[in-house]
């Protein structure tokens, strides 16, 4: 005899679960919400199944997106949960592929650790309004502190993803977000007497330098603004600073005026 | 009357070479973790340390000396003292010095430098735990 089909909760039942979860944060209610939306998770994971990754892994990644969406969803807003959750889940899947692409030269174990760290850092930052420290990342991931430090450093050492990388919301490149701010950047070049070295960075690298060192945004704030991870911002900034210093030293000598 | 703060002291001596930059990054990250600095703060400190260390790498072949740096791990901050650095941050007539100072001052809470009795300059950087 075939299994009876699983009963899908009605909209009003889902809404009641969300109201309850918002008030109590009861893990059982959260599990019920997860169960109610696993079809959505499978459906979105299947969209990415032709990119060489096992479907089970993609379902796991999409599930992380679902958990984030459940935690952030406000039932008072006049929006259906699925409408709210789809961009979050798709964003999580895209981030997974982007991180895999940028860490492709790392051993599998380190690659997985890097992804796990990245996800934990983002989730923590969103929940607490500040980036975590190492022990907080360790607590969130179950990875010991030494391995967290190694993992973060491993990610730093990996190849740098292109600044043209699509941001996590899948709609804008960094250039689209930052735009051109030629006058401000020219002022920065003049102020630091960089002898035109800023022009050796591309516009997007210049803009990252500007956001960090002139506007004074933290890496986490830049990451939020651009829809990329803090680790990604860190890599890109380090690379831009290295280029700037090398160009400056090459053009003027290490101690020249 | 001053009350002496309790600090853990860590000293590192390394060759001023590119592979050692990673060792210093790992050490700085580990000590930042002991203080409880968050990722942004730890990365700021690492960027500043790297900025100074790269100035030493540039001139490292001239000296072949081991480079010394000291960390002071305190309850509310991490201090880094980089010794005999060939980088005079107070000499703002040099564009490289001006650039380095700008980068470091933008991301470090306290920065001071003074001539080392033997050679170069001692650079003292402090990063405080966020409130």
Image (spheres, rainbow, N blue to C red):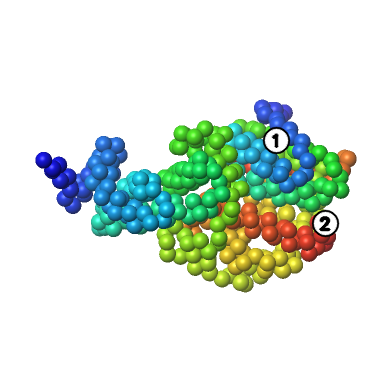
Residue at screen point 23% across, 46% down: A36
- Relative side of A143 to B84, left or right: left
Residue B88 visible in rendering: yes
Judged from this view, the residue extending furthest toward the front is A1
- Which quadrant of the rendered structure holds the C terminus of chain A? bottom right
Query: Residue B66 falls in which quadrant of the image?
Result: top right
Residue A120, x across and y down, in percent: 45, 43
Residue A64: tell me if it is visible: no
Q: What is the total number of numbered labels drawn onto the structure image?
A: 2
Work out how far the residue at label 2 is from the one at label 1, CA to CA, in angstroms. 26 Å
Instruction: Judge the density around disc 2: few (<14), some (14-19), many (≥20) Cα neighbours within 10 Å.
Output: some
Label 1 Cα crowd, 10 Å radius (few <14 / some 14-19 / many 20+):
many
Find residue B71 and name its label.
1
Q: Is residue B84 above or below residue B91?
A: above
Q: Is residue A104 left or right of residue A243?
A: left
Q: Nearer the viewer, residue A60 or A182?
A: A60
User: Which residue lies at the image location 82% right of the left edge and 47% below the top edge?
Assistant: B60
Which residue shows up at 71% across the image and 65% down it?
A197
Q: Residue A48 placed where, x, y %?
A: 37, 56
The residue under label 2 is A255
The chain holding disc 2 is: A
Horizontal side, residue A21 vs residue A230: left or right: left
Residue drawn at point x = 75 percent, y = 61 percent: A248
SS type, badge 2? loop
């Amino acid at each position: 005899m075939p299994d009876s089909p699983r009963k899908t909760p009605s909209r009003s039942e889902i809404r009641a679960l969300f109201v309850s979860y918002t008030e109590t944060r009861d893990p059982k209610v959260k599990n019920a919400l997860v169960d109610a939306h696993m079809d959505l998770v499978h459906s979105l994971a299947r969209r990415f199944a032709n990119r060489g990754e096992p479907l089970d892994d993609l379902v796991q990644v999409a599930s992380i997106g679902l958990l984030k969406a459940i935690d952030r969803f406000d039932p008072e807003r006049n929006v259906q949960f699925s409408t709210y959750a789809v961009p979050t889940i798709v964003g999580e899947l895209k981030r997974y592929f982007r991180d895999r692409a940028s860490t492709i030269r790392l051993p599998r174990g380190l690659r997985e650790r890097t992804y796990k760290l990245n996800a934990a850092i983002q989730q923590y930052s969103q929940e607490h309004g500040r980036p975590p420290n190492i022990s907080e990342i360790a607590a969130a991931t179950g990875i010991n502190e030494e391995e967290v430090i190694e993992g973060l450093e491993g990610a730093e050492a990996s190849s740098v993803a292109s600044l043209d990388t699509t941001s996590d919301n899948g709609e804008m490149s960094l250039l689209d977000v930052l735009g051109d701010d030629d006058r401000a950047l020219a002022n920065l070049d003049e102020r630091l007497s960089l002898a035109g070295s800023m022009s050796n960075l591309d516009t997007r690298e210049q803009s990252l330098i500007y956001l960090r060192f002139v506007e004074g945004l933290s890496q986490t704030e830049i990451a939020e603004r651009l829809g990329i991870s803090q680790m990604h911002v860190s890599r890109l900034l380090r690379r831009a600073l290295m280029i700037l210093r090398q160009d400056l030293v090459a053009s003027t000598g290490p101690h020249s005026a | 009357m001053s009350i002496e703060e309790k600090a853990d002291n860590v000293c590192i001596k390394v060759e001023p070479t590119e592979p050692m930059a990673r060792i210093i990054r790992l050490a700085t990250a580990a000590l930042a973790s002991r203080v409880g600095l968050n990722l942004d703060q730890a990365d700021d400190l690492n960027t500043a340390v790297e900025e100074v260390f790269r100035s030493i790498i540039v001139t490292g072949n001239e000296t072949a000396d081991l480079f010394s740096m000291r960390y002071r791990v305190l309850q509310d901050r991490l201090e880094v003292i980089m010794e005999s650095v060939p980088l005079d941050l107070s000499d703002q007539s040099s564009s490289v010095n001006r650039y380095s100072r700008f980068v470091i001052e933008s991301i470090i809470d306290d920065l001071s430098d003074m001539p080392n009795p033997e050679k170069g300059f001692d650079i003292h950087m402090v990063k405080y735990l966020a409130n």
